[in-house]
Amino acid sequence: MRIALLTLVYLAATLASGQSLPGGSAARAESDSSAGRKIFKQCRNCHSVRQGKFGTFGPNLYQLVGRMASTAPEYTYSPSPAGAGFAWTAERLDHWLTDSQAFLQSAKMKYFLESADVRANLIAYLSAAGKR
């Protein structure tokens, strides 16, 4: 009974914090922010993870994980993302990177990554980049 209660408390705390449960693609132990940095090179034409860097085609992604959607300064969002009303978590980023248009219709970004491992590495990099 005590183990079941502790498990329930753990699950509730994990979900309340916006983290994925162990085994979820965004929370894999093997996710690698160094590999994610290499993947992010594809994103640099439109995004930056440097604090205070603006003027890119897409929003600045510095401290993206935990930030409310559509709140990057100096960027104008399309209607669907602007009214999203949620904070970015690893799980939401995983859904977004799987198919951005299916996740938020009318989003300007039309992008997808088929590989769960590639998405997990990119999310690990974005999480780490916001902590520098």
Image: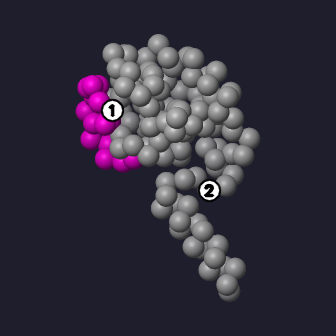
- Looking at the image, the residue that sits furthest to the bottom is 1
Residue beneath the point at 38% across and 36% down: 104
Please state the horizontal and vertical placement of residue 43, each as a whole percent of the image: 51, 19
Relative vertical location of residue 78 with respect to residue 26 in this rendering, above or below:
above
Quadrant in the picture for the N terminus: bottom right
Does 41 lie within the magenta span? no
Q: CA distance from mark 2 to mark 1?
A: 27 Å
Q: Which residue is mark 2?
A: 21
Q: Amino acid at mark 1?
A: Ala
Query: In which quadrant of the rendered view does residue 70 lie?
Result: top left
Does 72 lie within the magenta span? yes
Q: Which residue is mark 1?
A: 72
Please state the horizontal and vertical placement of residue 102, each as a whole percent of the image: 44, 35
- The answer to whether residue 110 of the structure is visible from this angle is no
- The magenta-colored residue range is 70-87
Residue beneath the point at 44% across and 21% down: 47
The numbered disc on residue 80 is none
